[in-house]
Amino acid sequence: MSRGSTRFGTVVLTGATSGIGREAALRIAPRCERLIVQGPEAPASVGALLAALNAVARGTVEYLSADFSRLDDVVALAASVRTLVGGSRVDLLVNNAGVPGAPTRVLTRDGFERTLQVNALAPALLTRLLMPSLAEGGRIVNVGSSAHRVEHFDWDDLALERDYTPVTAYARSKLTMVAWSRLLAGEIAPGGPTVVALCPGLNDTPLSSAMMGRIGGPATEGAARVLHAAEADVPSGSYLEGGRVVAPSADALEPRNQERLVETFWTTLRPYASSHRRSITWSTSP
């Protein structure tokens, strides 16, 4: 794929109402036939965004509200996407939705640490549920962070009941995302969607400012990196930093960590998934 020239059919983009996601949506809208964007806000609250997207869109734009701190919302979101696309396929799924680590540890009503759920568990569940609707030769883009390098898996305390800090929660959620991306790529059969994870760089967004203040470049820079990951000619399972393929952290690649991650996802997400095959994607069949 040549950079900047790819045209997409149907694109699903999560976390599209602010920051990198909003800027990515504005870049993708002129290049796809259908753009389905997600955010936690009620539809009545995103009129300005939808107006901006429709002003540049090549095709249709649709908004679906879902709160990723509620896994039932993720299930409903997947069902809505599958209804919208009908017999067609999703060519690009961008798992961008994310939250900063909260000042103090927060549990969701599903019983999980909020940052881990929103940034890692929810995208994994959504991807599993949309797998039957993903196009052969399509792509899954997972927005991670180089912050994953500063954290390690603690399988005795993945939910950070001890030693919680906002940065630790965020970094661990992104470590989980990056490690899962590698697993996901290995699980998908040849000819299926490719998987690319990336760090969008340090961008001045509501998410980053909540943890570190107003630092970093504009969100447009992160959006450009998301688009590059969507079309770059790189192997499935690649991780990008600065637009280049690099190795993720040793923790993300450690086989025992990957095994434990499979076990963890199976245990936590099985009640919400429609299939019961023991794999990180729970198969590519409905």
Image: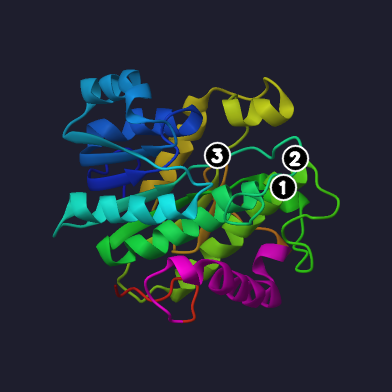
Q: Position of residue 19 (x, y in %)?
A: 50, 28
Identified by mark 3, the residue type is: Pro
Residue ID at (55%, 41%): 98
Up-down relation of residue 240 to residue 261 (above or below):
above
Query: Does the magenta portion include 205?
Result: no
Residue beneath disc 1: 169
Q: Which residues are magenta?
A: 251-277
| Cα distance between the residues tagged 3 and 1 | 18 Å
Q: Is residue 134 visible?
A: no
Residue ID at (80%, 43%): 165
| Cα distance between the residues tagged 3 and 2 | 19 Å
Up-down relation of residue 245 to residue 16 (above or below):
below
Neighbour class for label 2 at 10 Å: few (<14), some, many (≥20)? some
Q: Is residue 30 visible?
A: yes
Q: Residue furthest right?
A: 163
The answer to which of 8 and 100 lies nearer the viewer is 100
Residue beneath disc 2: 166
Residue ID at (64%, 30%): 208
Q: Position of residue 129 (x, y in %)?
A: 36, 63
Residue beneath disc 3: 200
